[in-house]
C-alpha cells in the first residue's frame, strides 16, 4: 500500500512552453502533497506543500506564478511549470501524506524535466 | 532552525564490509527521523523511521539505525554491504508541527568495491 505515481516520468520541452506534472496517490487518500526539486548530485529541496481544496504554501524563494500547484482531489496534485526555461530543468519529485499520525510521506518516482 | 547534517558526501566500502552513515540533526523537539535511499534517476525509498520507543530501529534490506538524543544523531548501519546497496542515502527530520514537512540532509553517496 501507499503507492504514489508521477506522470510523465520524463519530459522535454521548448523554452517558453508550459509543462504539467501529475502526482497521484494510487491506494490512499492524500490530505497533503509535497513537491520537491532535486538538482544533480544534490539533496531534495521542498518547493511547496499543498492540501486538498486549498492554496499551496510555497517555500521562500519559490516563484508561485512560475510553479503552479493544484490539489484538486484527495488523490491528485499537479505541478505546472509555466514559461519554462533551461534553468528550470531538474528532477521533480512529489510525495503524499495520509495526514494520520506522524504524517509519513510516500514518494513518487520523480519526473525529469529538460527544457531546451 | 531545523537542520540535518550528513558529514560524509561520499563513502566507499568493500562488499561484505560493515557500513555506518552518519546523520546529525538540529530540532527543538523530539524529532521524527527517517532514512531514505535513492538509486540514480529514481524516487526515494524509505529504509526506516524513528518516531518514539526503542532507539534502535530495524529497517528493510538489513539496515538499522540508532537514535541517540544526547548526540542528536541517527546513524545508519549495515553489518555486511552488498553491491546492490550502492546508491544515495538521505537522512531527514520530520517537522510534525509544520504539517509533516521533511528537512533533508545533503545526502551520502555510497560506492561498493567488489
Image: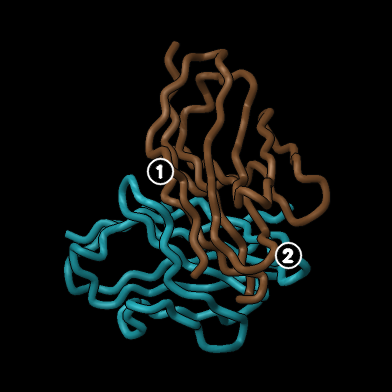
- Which secondary structure, mark 1? loop
Chain letter, colour cyan in render: A
Find residue A76 and report its horizontal and vertical position in percent.
58, 72
State the residue in front, A35 or A70: A35
Find residue B45 and report its horizontal and vertical position in percent.
58, 45
Toward which corner of the image does residue A14 lie, by quadrant? bottom left
Q: Residue at x 71, y 68 (%)?
A: A98
Chain hosting mark 1: B
- Which secondary structure, mark 2? helix
State the residue in front, A39 or A114: A39
Mark 2: give few (<14), some (14-19) or many (20+) Cα within 10 Å.
Answer: some
Mark drawn on residue B41: 1
Mark drawn on residue A102: 2
Chain hosting mark 2: A
Find residue B37 and report its horizontal and vertical position in percent.
54, 41
Q: Residue at x 66, y 66 (%)?
A: A97
Chain letter, colour brown in render: B
Q: Residue at x 46, y 34 (%)?
A: B87
Q: Is residue B61 left or right of residue A61?
A: right
Q: Is residue A49 above or below residue B32?
A: below
Mark 1: give few (<14), some (14-19) or many (20+) Cα within 10 Å.
Answer: few
Mark drawn on residue B71: none
Amino acid at each position: 500500500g501507499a503507492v504514489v505515481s508521477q506522470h510523465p516520468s520524463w519530459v522535454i520541452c521548448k523554452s517558453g512552453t508550459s509543462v504539467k506534472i501529475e502526482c497521484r496517490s494510487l491506494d490512499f487518500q492524500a490530505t497533503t502533497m509535497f513537491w520537491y526539486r532535486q538538482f544533480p548530485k544534490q539533496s531534495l529541496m521542498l518547493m511547496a506543500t499543498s492540501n486538498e481544496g486549498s492554496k499551496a504554501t510555497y517555500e521562500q524563494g519559490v516563484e508561485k506564478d512560475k510553479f503552479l500547484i493544484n490539489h484538486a482531489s484527495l488523490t491528485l496534485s499537479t505541478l505546472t511549470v509555466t514559461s519554462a526555461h533551461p534553468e528550470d530543468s531538474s528532477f521533480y519529485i512529489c510525495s503524499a501524506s495520509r495526514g494520520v499520525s506522524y504524517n509519513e510521506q510516500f514518494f513518487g518516482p520523480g519526473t525529469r524535466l529538460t527544457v531546451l | 532552525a531545523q537542520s540535518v547534517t550528513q558529514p560524509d558526501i561520499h563513502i566507499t566500502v568493500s562488499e561484505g564490509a560493515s557500513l555506518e552513515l552518519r546523520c546529525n540533526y538540529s530540532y527543538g523537539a523530539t524529532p521524527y527521523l527517517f532514512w531514505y535511499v535513492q538509486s540514480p534517476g529514481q524516487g526515494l525509498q524509505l529504509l526506516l523511521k524513528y518516531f518514539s520507543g526503542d532507539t534502535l530501529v530495524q529497517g528493510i534490506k538489513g539496515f538499522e539505525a540508532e537514535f541517540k538524543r544526547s548526540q542528536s544523531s541517527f546513524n545508519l548501519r549495515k553489518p555486511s554491504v552488498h553491491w546492490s546497496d550502492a546508491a544515495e542515502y538521505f537522512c531527514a527530520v520530520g517537522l510534525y508541527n509544520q504539517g509533516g514537512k521533511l528537512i533533508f540532509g545533503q545526502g551520502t553517496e555510497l560506492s561498493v568495491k567488489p
